Amino acid sequence: MRKLARWSFSHRRIVVAAWLIAVVGLTVIHSAAGSDYRDSFKLSGTDSSDAQALLQASSPGTSGDVDHIVVAAEAGKSIREPAVKAEVTAMLKEVEGLPHVGSVASPYAAGGADQISEDGRIAYATVTFDEQANDLPTGAIEKVIDTAQASAGNGLDVQLGGQAIGQTHKPSTGGTAIGFLAAAIVLFLVFGSFFAMLMPLLTAGFGLGAGIAVIGLLSHAITMASFSSELSLLIGLGVGVDYALFIVTRFRQGLLRGLSPEDAVVDALDTSGRAVMFAGITVCIALLGMFALGVSFLYGVAIAASVVVSLTVVAALTLLPALLGFIGPRILGRRTRRELAAKGVLSESDESPAWSRWAGLLQRRPALFAAGAAVFLIVVAIPFLSIRLGSSDEGNDPSGTTTRQAYDLLAEGFGPGFNGPLLLVAQVPDKAAEAGFESALTAAEKTADVAAVTPATVIPGRDGRPAVATANVIPEGSPQDASTTDLLHQLRDQTIPDATAGSGARVLVGGQTAVFEDFSNVLAGKLPLFIGVVVLLSFLLLMAVFRSLVVPLMASAMNLLSAGAAFGVITAIFQWGWGASLLGIDRTGPIEAFLPVMVFAILFGLSMDYEVFLVSRIYEEWRKRGDNREAVVHGLSATARTITAAAAIMVLVFGAFILGGERVIMLFGVGLATAVLLDAVVVRSVLVPALMLLAGRSNWWLPAWLDRIIPHLNVEGSSEHAPEPTPRLTPKDTPVTES
């Protein structure tokens, strides 16, 4: 690390030029090639997946994504008026001839009367594509939208809804600029220097610029969810600024101790730089660990976020030392530079007087503070116990989008269930199977929370395959309602099996609503395993770093507690509706099934960042002083100011993304901002030091046989100022508390 720091400092012009060329070049290539973000929910072995495969084999033209064109006449007029009918019919005929459109079911065709609302003002046409939404070219979907909406006007409103249509939404990145501004304000308040404020922002900006271009290009080769770029921006901006902040802080401290700019850069990278690299690696490991879940939807998201985090780390370890070489002592304020020039050395201590007073107060009543902090986090986490995982429907889309307006029109004219019908599919090789399918429809129609059941459609078999029968079940509730989820399970587990017993018909329940529910069930079933793996990894890494059993055990428990509290806040706002109106949320619903997995993975890495920064300094003081209380007090005093400043930046950056209006991004923004705030202020500044004070010398005990087995990971660097190690503790040296 020292060689990298010295080389980057000495060859700063080459480093900066290389980064400029790389970012500009990647951005130009990305602009020319564009992006191809797509949402994909392929879940092998589920009912919804089997239903889709059956339709694909029997009738490819009708097996694609099913979307709606919704038309509405102005108040007092009817969609049946001759002029309106002629306009809509011509438009639908043109849409039917577009590429990738398999069929269009017009409300004016024979049997289409049910597609017109009772008051005659709203109607819908069903557009069936020849591919699933994630396999359709964006250009083909946009052509359908443009063709349909060209007929709008003169009292006719035309909106489109469905999974494919929704993929054309460009996620808003409006929170990026606000996040940068918020970070700049906090940095200036912390450092009081323009250049100290600028360095972290420039470093993060270069890393983000390269990262977004790279993942945009990767989206052509790897399926990435539509929100991957904005989520990567959210994560990358937060960690990028924080990583640079830690290094800049150490660089400034080195200058104040009288080091030359080059030696201060080398010392900063050899200490804080190692912690940054370690934290970045753990974030990427946790994100890529989502591959173990076996859910392809998360693969692209994990890769995108990992690429951006990796490039922000590389920028912090190469570009930042080069930039610091140009800035030198100007990273300090003018008054501080004058005093430094006059005295040579301004500070031998990195401790904050205010945090020293807090640490002193903490050491007098550690049990009281630990209990209070733990109770507070547990209370905040209580709503998490009632979390309902699922997928929000288009009723949560921003009000100005065509999918939201189509959703509202369908709900007004036909009921919310029309936005997400359940699709019944079955092979009917003989009359008995056909009769069984009809029995299933009859039973479904009598089931509670069913608004309507469409007549069966029989698709002739191809290539010797049996015919396939299909029908739609329209729920009373919206696709995201708990009643719809209950209905889906009722149909699958009881109603349909009872109705088809002995007929030989296997009726599958599919459709987009069923796909999302199956996705939620798969993730919910694997979530405990994933959390267990992440916590175990956290434990092993910290044990290797700090040569301790208590410290990693404590950190693992704290990660779970802070994550639970963050999920509790998310549940209270987005599911229960507490304070939702303050964020502009006009509709509550389930929590996206993939959110706990991703938030926990990201939080794990960020928590490790703060944990390493705090405990490594406490560990350093312990080795120097041999007194646990002194080590905790002085370690907290030296690091808490930087940790809280870094947390403030992250909270503001993550919070800024709430303003974008995209529900998924708002979930991540609220979840991560809450998690970071609680982790830095409550966990790292109160709970962890209080528990370490209570544990006493037990913090640093590790069995000798385990000490010989596990590898040594150095995050303290090889600075000449490093203290000599203290002798390894044994059980007999280790009291439970220290008075």
Image (cartoon, helix red, strand yellow):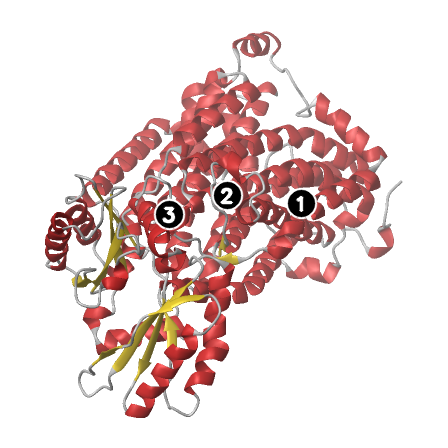
Task: For residue 133, say whether it is visible.
Answer: yes
Residue that badge 2 annotates? 277
x and y, in percent, of residue 547 in the image: 69, 51
Three-letter amino acid code of the residue under disc 3: Phe
Q: Which residue position is annotated with label 3?
A: 227
Give whichever of 240, 474 is nearer the camera. 474
Q: Is residue 426 above or below residue 613?
A: below
Q: In the rendered structure, are the residues bearing label 3 and label 2 in contact, judged by CB atoms less than 8 Å apart?
A: no
Which residue lies at the image location 36% right of the left edge and 86% below the top edge? 436
Q: For the residue carrying disc 3, how many other residues have a C-alpha within 10 Å: few (<14), some (14-19), or many (20+)?
A: many
Mark 3–mark 2 Cα distance, whole angstroms, equals 26 Å
Give x and y (percent) for residue 301: 40, 52
**Is residue 472 shown above or below 121?**
below
- Above or below, 498 against 698 in this view is below
Q: Which mark is residue 490?
A: none
Q: Does residue 596 appear left or right of residue 555 in this picture?
A: left
Q: Secondary structure at mark 3?
A: loop
Sequence-wise, which precedes: disc 1 or disc 2? Answer: 2
What secondary structure is found at the residue carrying circle 2?
Answer: helix
Q: Secondary structure at mark 1?
A: helix
> What's the mark number on residue 380?
1
Q: Which residue is found at the position 43% from the left and 57% from the top? A: 478
Foreground of the two, 726 or 252:
252
Q: The disc labelled 1 sits on which kind of residue? A: Val
User: Is 372 on the left-hand or right-hand side of 609?
Assistant: right
